Image (cartoon, helix red, strand yellow):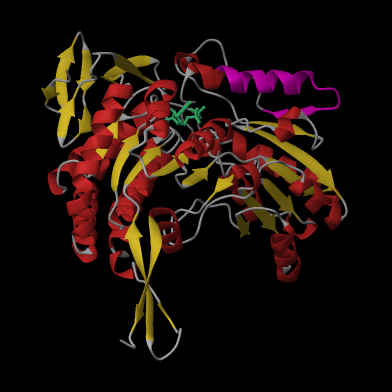
């Protein structure tokens, strides 16, 4: 039996214990298991969360199902107002949230964690403001027929999120799902659940019990149990393509709709006229070097025109090497630490492979230092391999770390063919002053999101998602909410009787 507890039971065995939110209460796992949360910047354990398993998921889904009838009938604008109140409360304490994110994810506070905390409040507010847009249509079937559609909530949503931008991605499930009238069981990532639980504490002050449940646990236990639970009516997953396939298979068993935001190996195509500093800054942003490149939209394949190959890379080396790697909580750090030992070793493995790859030229970077302050955490060094080929493993697989491959091209048609020669299709970047050329490329590239002359992150309002094995469905936008979190019901009335 789970024990009701306050959100935080301070200092048990030296570790801060944080509960998970089920049916409006903060609880332990039924079986009593816990997961220690490690700070990637120091490798120190900072807290523990419940190791939720199938029984806990079952209670959370049942709580969400019980809360659904009343919540779905709350007028949409009222639901939206509640989300906006949560947004205001989060924003009022944004600094606290930023520190939690920096500590648990290793993402540098100035460049990543604080913008993520602010962005999360923005997401809650944006969707809160869309409540009035849950509109249906009337269909002109003739004078004596009234045919209309309603946008109805689907029911209990089971959502699973990763650790790379955990709070933003959590709010991207919470806000549209709840605004549309669904109730939610959100499975936080085992590596970074604290920020999401913190947001849940605030949300719980405003929402009826059971509307939002946030569970913690391992993917194969809690995540898998959520994906196969018969009470879940919609699955929304953000994470690796590998696990996305498992989620889709699980969804098939109960024929539930599924949205998947998966991996990427996004191309950046630089034309010869863009051998300029602004484009270099853009490439650094697109590659997400300041998030240790732990981003599915990272522009990790750099296609440089042969005429500017060396000069562009020289500028890139100069600017990237000036970025400061260090303590995520230090305001002067540009780059923080990789999330955990497993990812860190994986990234180092790719660097080693590049160093041994015949024909590869390591322009800068390399393996992390084994001594000194950076060896205290999972700090990887931005690394660029020049003269890469598009068929190398380094150019095909999602590394999820700061390893960039630079590939030469001379004909536009070849650059686009290489860009499209990937099983992924999430994001892409095109760099040129020639707008006609830019748009030609943007239209030819197989990706859900193409940016021209900028490498920024997503913002509320634009439809975000991938094609091919990068996913199904869209997020971040009104259409994302409507398509992913509602279904259309048609009502047809014979007015002739
Ligand atoms: P990463 O390898 O980057 O952690 P994953 O796709 O493995 O990405 O993890 C993303 C989320 O999916 C996490 O919350 C994780 O716990 C969850 N997860 C992992 N494996 C499974 C699984 N078999 N079923 C359901 N969820 C899973």
Q: Position of residue 75 (x, y in %)?
A: 20, 64
Magenta stretch contains residue 361? yes
Q: Nearer the viewer, residue 324 or 259?
A: 259
Q: Residue furthest top?
A: 13
Residue 16 seen in render: yes
Examine the image and state in which quarter residue 408 appears: top right
Q: Position of residue 192 (x, y in %)?
A: 37, 28
Residue stretch rendered in magenta on the structure: 345-364
Q: Position of residue 124 (x, y in %)?
A: 30, 53
Residue 329 seen in render: no
Q: Quadrant of the C terminus?
A: bottom left
The dominant secondary structure in magenta is helix
Q: Is residue 160 above or below residue 431?
A: above
Q: Nearer the viewer, residue 268 or 145?
A: 145
Q: Quadrant of the N terminus?
A: top left
Q: Is residue 409 above or below residue 386?
A: below
Q: Is residue 68 left or right of residue 221?
A: left
For the point 38% across and 48% down, the residue is: 172
Q: Nearer the viewer, residue 55 or 376?
A: 55
Q: Is residue 478 left or right of residue 348?
A: left
Q: Residue furthest front?
A: 497
Magenta stretch contains residue 474? no
For the point 85% across and 56% down, the residue is: 413
Q: Is residue 355 left or right of residue 491?
A: right
């Amino acid at each position: 039996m789970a024990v009701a507890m306050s959100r935080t039971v301070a200092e048990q065995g030296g570790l801060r214990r944080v509960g998970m939110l089920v049916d409006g209460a903060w609880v332990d796992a039924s079986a009593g298991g816990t997961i220690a949360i490690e700070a990637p910047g120091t490798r120190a354990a900072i807290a523990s969360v419940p190791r939720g398993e199938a029984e806990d998921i079952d209670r959370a889904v049942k709580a969400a199902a019980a809360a659904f009838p009343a919540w779905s009938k709350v007028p949409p604008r009222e639901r939206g107002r509640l989300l906006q109140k949560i947004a205001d409360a989060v924003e009022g304490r944004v600094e606290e949230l930023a520190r939690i994110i920096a500590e648990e994810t290793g993402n540098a506070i100035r460049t990543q964690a604080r913008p993520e905390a602010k962005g999360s409040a923005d997401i809650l507010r944006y969707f809160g403001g869309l409540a009035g847009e849950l509109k249906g249509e009337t269909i002109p079937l003739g004078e004596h027929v009234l045919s209309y559609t309603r946008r109805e909530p689907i029911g209990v949503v089971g959502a699973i999120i990763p650790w790379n931008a955990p709070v933003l991605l959590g709010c991207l499930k919470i806000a549209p799902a709840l605004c549309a009238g669904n109730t939610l069981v959100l499975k936080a990532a085992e590596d970074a659940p604290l920020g999401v639980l913190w947001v849940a504490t605030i949300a719980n002050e405003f929402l009826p019990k059971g509307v939002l449940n946030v569970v913690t646990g391992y993917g194969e236990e809690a995540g898998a149990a959520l994906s196969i639970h018969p009470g879940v009516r919609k699955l929304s997953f953000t994470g690796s393509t590998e696990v996305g396939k498992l989620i889709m298979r699980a969804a098939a068993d109960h024929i539930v709709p599924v949205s998947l935001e998966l991996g990427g190996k996004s191309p950046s195509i630089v034309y010869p006229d863009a051998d300029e500093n602004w484009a270099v800054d853009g490439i650094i942003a697109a590659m997400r070097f300041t998030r240790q490149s732990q981003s599915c939209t990272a522009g990790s394949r750099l296609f440089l025109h042969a005429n500017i190959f060396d000069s562009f890379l020289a500028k890139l080396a100069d600017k990237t090497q000036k970025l400061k790697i260090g303590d995520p909580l230090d305001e002067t750090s540009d780059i923080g630490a990789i999330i955990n030992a497993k990812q860190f070793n994986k990234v180092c493995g790719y660097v080693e492979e590049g160093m041994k790859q015949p024909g590869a030229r390591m322009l800068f970077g390399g393996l992390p230092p084994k001594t000194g302050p950076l060896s205290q955490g999972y700090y990887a060094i931005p690394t660029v391999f020049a003269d890469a080929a598009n068929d190398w493993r380094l150019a095909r697989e999602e590394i999820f770390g700061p390893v960039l491959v630079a590939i030469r091209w001379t004909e536009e048609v070849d650059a686009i063919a290489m860009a499209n020669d990937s099983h992924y299709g999430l994001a892409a970047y095109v760099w040129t002053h020639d707008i006609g050329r830019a748009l030609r490329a943007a239209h030819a590239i197989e990706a859900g999101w193409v940016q021209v002359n900028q490498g920024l992150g997503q913002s509320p309002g634009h439809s975000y998602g991938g094609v091919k094995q990068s996913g199904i469905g869209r997020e971040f936008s009104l259409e994302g909410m409507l398509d992913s979190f509602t279904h259309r019901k048609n009502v047809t009335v014979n007015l002739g009787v």
